[in-house]
Structures are given as structure tokens and as C-alpha cells.
Amino acid sequence: MSRTPEKSRVILVTGAAGGIGAAIAELAIARGHRVLLTDVDEDAVLTRARALGERAAAHALDIRSPEEWSRAFDAAQERFGAVDVLVNNAGITHTGNARDLRPQQHRDIVEINLLGTVTGVCTALGRMTAQGHGHIINVCSMTSFLPLPGYATYGGTKHGLRAFHHSVAIEERDGPVDFTIVHPPSTRTGMLAQEMADPTSAIAFAEKSYAPEQIAEAVVDAVTSRPVEVVFPPIAGRVQRIAGVFPGLMRRVIPVVEARGRRQRARLLSAPGIPSSGN
Ligand SMILES: NC(=O)c1ccc[n+]([C@@H]2O[C@H](COP(=O)([O-])OP(=O)(O)OC[C@H]3O[C@@H](n4cnc5c(N)ncnc54)[C@H](O)[C@@H]3O)[C@@H](O)[C@H]2O)c1
């Protein structure tokens, strides 16, 4: 089915060297947008952008640095014009139960997933308010609704990001900037491969995982439709969003879900040709 051509927008994507960010950049370009791909891994993001042609450019951006955020917005402006859409996608995890992570690992997760994204939102807000339009899309996680074993600090940053996101969106309700938050479930990227390597992350394999292209489709669709919040899977995700509010219920349900995740992980590990990805 042919799509109605979309208005070409300038989109800045973080964490675009691989995984979900790279899939977002690729699909956005295929739909006629212009994309500044950014990542802390400069060589990888340059290589990725080169493969995407004229409507792609790359810039090094460690989202922890306010100065690098300003330079990335300047680079986008210089190459394509003002940034219409920021896709805050970069994020990390360190697998393991909270008591086993080093203090620096806890800090890295918070500094990147939460504070790095907050810095990006604030940088974008200043510029987009001044230019009179803009759209901020934060890529969060279904763990923002659920207390999950093996995801204490990671889930903590995603709970925090969701609260921050919606609070700012309400603060800015009379301004010119739109806000969308997208919550991927387990997605077959380097992050899921990292989780496959650690049995404490078994719960990530309890449900069917998604391809990064499926998450990218929701994000790039959101550039036009500007939804408030997107959960995965569309129906079960809504149930999970409510279940997470009840920790007593979660304590009863999680052992069952975790056991299913362990079985699925073992099955995937023993399947020929799928050494490190979800189902
Ligand atoms: N893969 C999943 O199962 C899953 C599930 C839910 C949410 N998410 C979220 O989706 C987003 C993308 O994850 P992914 O699975 O594509 O991960 P990924 O590890 O495949 O890619 C993450 C990218 O972010 C970059 N990055 C890391 N630290 C950075 C920093 N300080 N500044 C800029 N870039 C940095 C990495 O170099 C990498 O290119 C993350 O926010 C993640 O939390 C992923």
C-alpha cells in the first residue's frame, strides 16, 4: 500500500550507531526526513550515516555532556536547518542484581539513561521554544511501569524518565513543543544480547521480543501522529502498565514470569543459529 508522502523534517537521533536508534534513522530517511545521527561511538555513527546517503549526517554526542548537546544541535542546524524532532534514544544497561553491580555501574546507568536524556530534553526545549515549534520523542522502556528483578537501577531510570517526561510535557502544555514517549519491550539489539549472556536478566525472555525495525516504525509514525504515549504490545502493554502499580501483585506474579523467561532463555541458547538474540 502506498503511503501519503510525509512532510520532510529534520530529526536528531541519539544512540544511532546501532540497535533501535540506527533502525529509526534508516526508516526516517526512507520516509523522506533528514537525520543527524549521533552517538558516543563516533566511528560507528559516521559509518552508519555514510551508508544512508545525502539526507543523513553524523555527529559525535555523549548525551552526558551539555556542551556536546549544544554542538550537536548547531551541527544539525548548519547541515539541514533547525531541528524539528529530537529522538532521545541512547541508553545503556549493566546486567545483574542491584547488590552485585559496582557503584560506578549504577551511576553510569543513571547518568546516561536519566540525566543524559534530561539534558537533551532541556537543550531541545530552549531551542524549539525559541523557533516556535518542535517535537521531543523519548525512547523509554516497559520497565518504566514494572519493578523487575535484574533491572533495579535500569528500571529506576526508566520510571524516572517517564515521570520527568510527562511532568515537563504538562509544564509546557501551552508552548509550541509536542511530547511523545515510546516504551519498547525486549528488542533484539546489542542490549538484549548483553541480557542473554546473564541469567539474572532471564525475565527479558519471558515474552516474545521485537525487531528494532518494529520499534522504529512506531517512533517514525509518531513524528507525524504525535501520540502522547506508545506501549508494546499494544494490548498486553496496557495491562502491564496497570499491574506495575501493585507491588504485592507483582511479587506473586513475577516468579511465574521469571521461570518462563528462564525456560525460554535456555531454549534460545540451545537453538542452533540463535546464540544471543530473543525470540
Ligand atoms: N533492546 C531492548 O530490549 C530495549 C528494551 C526497552 C527499551 N530499550 C531502550 O531503547 C534504547 C536503545 O536501546 P538499544 O537496544 O538500541 O541499545 P543498543 O545498546 O543496541 O544501542 C545503544 C546505542 O547508544 C549508544 N550510547 C551509549 N551510551 C551513550 C552515551 N553516553 N551517549 C550517546 N550514545 C550512547 C551506544 O553506543 C549504542 O550505539 C535505550 O534507551 C534502551 O534503554 C531497549
Image (cartoon, grey):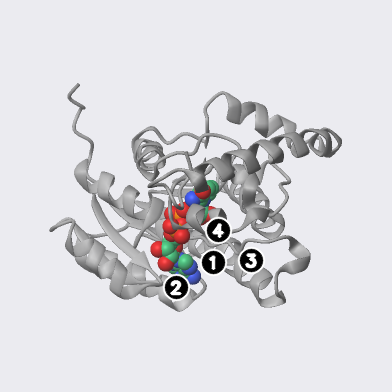
Q: Which residue is mark 4?
A: 197
Report crowding for label 4: few under 14, some 14 to 19, many 20 or more residues within 10 A (C-alpha): some
Real-space CA distance between mark 2 and mark 4, rounded to the nearest whole angstrom: 26 Å
Q: Is mark 2 within 8 Å of ligand 1?
A: yes
Q: Nearer the viewer, residue 100 or 45?
A: 100
Which dot marks residue 116?
1
38 or 192: which is nearer to us?
Answer: 192
Above-or-below relation of 119 to 209: below
Of labels 3 and 4, earlier in sequence is 3
Secondary-structure class at tag 2: loop
Q: Residue at x 70, y 36 (%)?
A: 257
Look at label 1 and name its amino acid.
Gly
- Image marks 1 and 2: residues in contact by CB distance under 8 Å: yes
Which structural element holds mark 4? Answer: loop
Labels 1, 4: front one: 4
Q: Residue at point 45% right, 39% down?
A: 210
For marks 3 and 2 on the same chain, the one whose residue lies earlier in the sequence? 2
The image shows residue 73 at horizontal and vertical percentages of 35, 67
Quarter location, residue 204: top right
Residue that label 2 marks: 62
Q: Mark 1 Cα within 10 Å, few/some/many (few <14, many 20+)?
A: many
Q: Is 278 in front, or is 156? A: 278
